[in-house]
Image (cartoon, grey):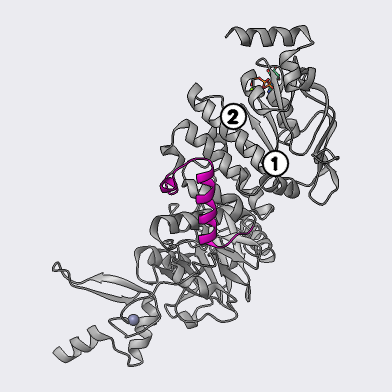
Amino acid sequence: MTDTPLLKVNDVSKFYGSRIGCRNVSFELWPGEVLAIVGESGSGKTTLLSCLSTRLMPSSGIVEYHMRDGQYRDLARMGEAERRFLMRTDWGFVHQNPADGLRMTVSAGANVGERLMAVGDRHYGNIRATAADWLARVEIDEDRIDDQPRAFSGGMRQRLQIARNLVTSPRLVFMDEPTGGLDVSVQARLLDLVRGLVHDLGLSAIIVTHDLAVARLLSHRMMVMKDGLVIEQGLTDRVLDDPREPYTQLLVSSILQV
Amino acid sequence: MADLATYNFAYLDEQTKRMIRRAILKAISIPGYQVPFASREMPMPYGWGTGGVQVTAAILGPNDVLKVIDQGADDTTNAVSIRAFFQKVANVAVTTKTREATIIQTRHRIPEETLSAGQTLVYQVPIPEPLRFLEPRETETRKMHALEEYGLMHVKLYEDIARNGHIATTYAYPVKVEGRYVMDPSPTPKFDNPKMHRSEALQLFGAGREKRIYAVPPYTDVVSLDFEDHPFEIQHFDKPCALCGAEHVYLDEVVLDDKGGRMFVCSDTDHCEDRREHGHAGEMLARQEAAE
Ligand SMILES: Nc1ncnc2c1ncn2[C@@H]1O[C@H](COP(=O)(O)OP(=O)(O)OP(=O)(O)O)[C@@H](O)[C@H]1O
Ligand SMILES: [Mg+2]
Ligand SMILES: [Zn+2]
């Protein structure tokens, strides 16, 4: 890890009218670091993730990103063209529901190749070869390259979505409940895959989950949210093994009983 | 009461024409950009080229000579009725000769004869948005045009190659205009795409139901999208036109009998007739003459 954060989040709040989405969130994300955001339903996890990934505009606060040119940029002040370019090159976003992140009516190969074409790749053979390579990396048989994700299982779709995001070698990936709708055994395989990829590629990631086992397996650090506030944060092992806040203690003990 | 049956020159009132002309001027100044306009009801159903008819009505003057083609032919129902419409409401001269026309309204084809400066080609467009098939949201496609995000067009071509081994799109083949906007050249065959490139003529596109006008001004770059390893190619025909012997023209298949007999002839009927008048004869014509 280098000595400059990839993302600097300063006092971010989001209100939906008078309803609180998230409040006064500050933290820094370091290169290669995986951060889990945990908390019960409605605690503000998705809202925070949306504010960080520019899918929502925060009501107040600043999110700065360390661009490849070494400059920090206030994401709210970035032009739309540049922001969208950043989102499909240097970032990834993995949705809980793969249908939200995939094109369901084009082939797996084109789903993976789309970002390459978006940044100007114009060689069909190369695009296809890269897509095939990425399918292999997410453990999808190469002979499925011309199938549409409609014909894939939930786990395969999620792996395809991940490949589609990683093909441009992003530095930062946002994930919202990436294992959400999957069977337990399928979840385990996906988690292993994500962990391997994050490690091999040196990715930074922010993963929203209400599953502490996911946080334990994937993240270095975690933040616990309640009612829109971050009530506890720290190294994942520390938070899970030695929770300080009563609410976190409850959360941890309830999962241990399961 | 006696005036009930009268209408303005070229059917549309002057106010409406001015509105359409403003849209056309805007379209000309931003080549390939789809300009929204308040499309009017025309006395013909959508799908009959109401967009093209409105564009023609807005630019038509008393001294214009109008040609109307449908699938390259001047004598189909659609072409005949649009031509008759303008004869009736504007009393303009009409022609089937490409060379003589000042305005050519078309569905599906660009004439084989190279158009020259001063001529205007008006296309009837059913679906103006080239990104529509993969992105149904209008707000999103507008943004993609605004930000020049055209990766999706290549996704479509990629799918074509993955499925067929080559780019199988033959109609409405997407082009990039003046290095900026991606445009759907309407249902013309890709055979005609190269004719759009740096044409001396003004090309106007009208979509009635979708309420869009776009344009390619004279001498504008029009480049068909492709891949480095799958370059754009026009259709090739094995034989020349059976009637006039023309090569390097777009041919239609004509069924001759119920025993599988067929021939391929120019889709551009004026071009074919003109060649025959000048003594060119294809295989079928030569055979007929020999029989007589
Ligand atoms: N678009 C919206 N309009 C109004 N209120 C919203 C909106 N989106 C979220 N909220 C509210 O903001 C709060 C935080 O919601 P959010 O979706 O961020 O929670 P979450 O932690 O992601 O929950 P879950 O685990 O159920 O996905 C909730 O009270 C929610 O009702
Ligand atoms: Mg959520
Ligand atoms: Zn001919």
Give A103 or A127, whichever is nearer the viewer.
Answer: A127
Instruction: Say if labels 2 and 1 share a chain.
Output: yes
Q: Quadrant of the C terminus of chain B?
A: bottom left
Give A56 or A246, whichever is nearer the viewer.
Answer: A246
Relative side of A34 to B244, left or right: right
Residue B182 position by quadrant: bottom right
Give me the disc on residue A178. Answer: 2
Relative side of B62 to B281, left or right: right
Residue A58 position by quadrant: top right
Residue bearing mark 1 = A202
Residue B284: x and y in percent read 23, 83
Residue B228: x and y in percent read 54, 67
Relative vertical location of residue A188 with respect to residue B223 in this rendering, above or below: above
Relative side of B291 to B125, left or right: left
**The residue carrying mark 1 has its beta carbon less than 8 Å from ligand 2:** no
Give B3 or A172, whichever is nearer the viewer.
Answer: A172
* Residue stretch in magenta: A120-147
Residue A146 is covered by the magenta coloring: yes
Residue B26: x and y in percent read 68, 61
Residue A56: x and y in percent read 73, 32
